[in-house]
Image: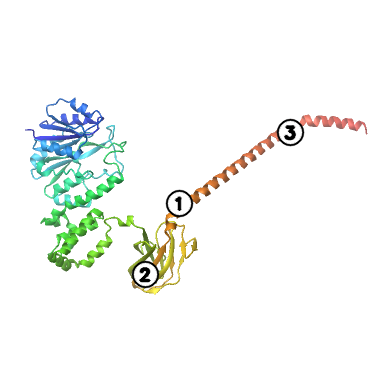
Amino acid sequence: MPKVSVILTSYNHEKYFAASIESLLNQTFSDFELLISDDGSTDSSQKIIRSYKDKRIKLFLHEKNIGAVNCYIECIKAAAGKYIALQHSDDIWELDKLEKQVEFLEKNPQYEACFTQVKFIDERGAPYELPENHPYKKVFKQENRPRELWLNHLFWNSNCFCHPTMLIRNAQENFAISPEFFNLPDYFQWVNFCTKKSPYVLPEELISFRLRRESQNSVSSINLEKTVRISNELYFVAREFLPILRDENFLKVFPEAEEFLIGGEISTEFAFAQLCLKRNLPAFQKLALEILQDLLHNEGKRNLIKKLYGYDEKSFIRDTAKFDVFGMKAQLPILNCKLYLDFGGGFNEVDTVKNSVLIRPDENFTATFDFDADKEIVSLRFDPDEKAGLSIKILKITVNGEIVESFTSNAFQVADGYFNFITADPYFTIDKKLSAGKVHVEILGAVRNDALLNFEENFFAACAKIQQLENLLQEKISQVQQLENQIAAQNEEIQNLLNSNSWQVTKPLRSIGKILRKFR
């Protein structure tokens, strides 16, 4: 029985496959079997695979594509080794990678998986220094930490383990790959792993991780389908953190949740839900709302979170309006309104109250702003949105229940009661002095949708027409300039001609003058 089973997955990597497989077969540690799964390659990958006759190789060659995850599962079930390692057919191992990882796990039974650092190469195999904004620039450069803090890092960030550097023991128990994941199987896998077991990252760069800049159709490419899928898969990953709620080491995983420990009592479910809300991802926020609803449905848990945190049904109702987990703001007609407060020094972005307001089917909207002013306000400014082409009618403005009759705007015209704006920074100024204290501002208005929908198109059409006229004018000016240059050139030519032939003209004139003088 081999000590290590190495799983090598392949799909259309004929240019890189030979270098990859040879980096495995030439390892200084040789007690391994090599399970190669080709996922229905349409290039010459399978021909290259068959050309290797090493007795350690076991082949799983597919005529049709079954998916990389299914290839992994197939090989894991067939693996006979004490440890399992993964390799991609476009990456390259250092020749002592297996030796160093096996030695580490043999000496450190407290760790179930061992990873390494990576160096990057490009499609030619040359060293590739990643730009600072590249997503892989720092993600794998991790210091070792306790299992609980690995989980904390995975929660607040994303996957940080480089999959093809892994060597893992007890793979059937520890390697929870799910075929229903396409974009985030690694993230799911290592969250699940770290809820029970401890990983370790060797500080050495023992694989060359290839990044192919010319590829536009890889899993790493960004498109709408992938973005939607990731959002859904993130929700399933978020659920993998739930076992931590029953873990006695909950506060070791989330030391930031100590603020929810009150008088020696804590609701780990409530604390985790609040952390998920702070995660600022719809998938995590959806899970948080589900947890909070379940807490409120249980009398004992409902009483506990109300006693400890003052959280009740009204609090939950506010949260269900605050966290837009289904992206309704992007689907509905919205005005992103702002109310600027002038405390005597003018308007600025700091002293601002924001509110996203729905435009109702009747084209009306109601923008409300509630806030506490710590000093006197000398003026208010209402910005309905930051977009050009707004057409707004103000139906009523009330400040602390008092109707405001006077206001000004930077609209370029007012027609039929609608203020029509060209600028992308439209506003209404309300000259109203207010004392410090609670303030309630309510603005009722209407939006002319045809202006909203058609203005930008008409505006750019008008700009195009103006540009066309400017081009025509410039063409005429150029033609006039050419004529002027031609006239100047002809004048210069005439002058040069006169200057060069003046002696031929003056000599006859002098002769004629002599003859005329004889007749005097």
Give the amino acid type for the residue marked by disc 1 in the picture: Glu
* Residue at screen point 23% across, 56% down: 286
Q: Position of residue 479 (x, y in %)?
A: 61, 41
Label 1 element class: helix
Query: Of the numbered discs in the image, which one, if any, rests on residue 397?
Result: none
Residue 221 x %, y %: 29, 41
Q: Is residue 333 above or below residue 201?
A: below
Is 370 placed left or right of 346 in the picture? Answer: left
In the rendered image, the quadrant that contains the N terminus is top left
Q: Nearer the viewer, mark 2 or mark 1?
A: 1
Tell me the residue that label 3 is attached to.
498
Q: Nearer the viewer, residue 187 or 183?
A: 183
Q: Is residue 78 above or below residue 421?
A: above
Name the outermost residue toward the front. 362
- Residue 348, relative to residue 105: is it above or below? below
Which comes before the other along the chain, label 3 or label 2?
2
Which one is in front, 282 or 271? Answer: 282
Q: Is residue 515 left or right of residue 383?
A: right
Of residues 348 and 472, the one drawn nearer to the viewer in this rendering: 472
Residue denoted by label 2? 441
First-in-chain label (1 vs 3): 1
446, 246: nearer the viewer? 446
Residue 417 location (% of width, % of height):
47, 65
Amino acid on which disc 3 is placed: Leu
- Please give the residue where the numbered disc 1 appears in the rendered image: 457
Q: On the image, which quarter does residue 258 sit in? A: bottom left
Residue placed farthest to the left in the image? 1
Of the residues tagged 1 and 3, which is closer to the observer?
1
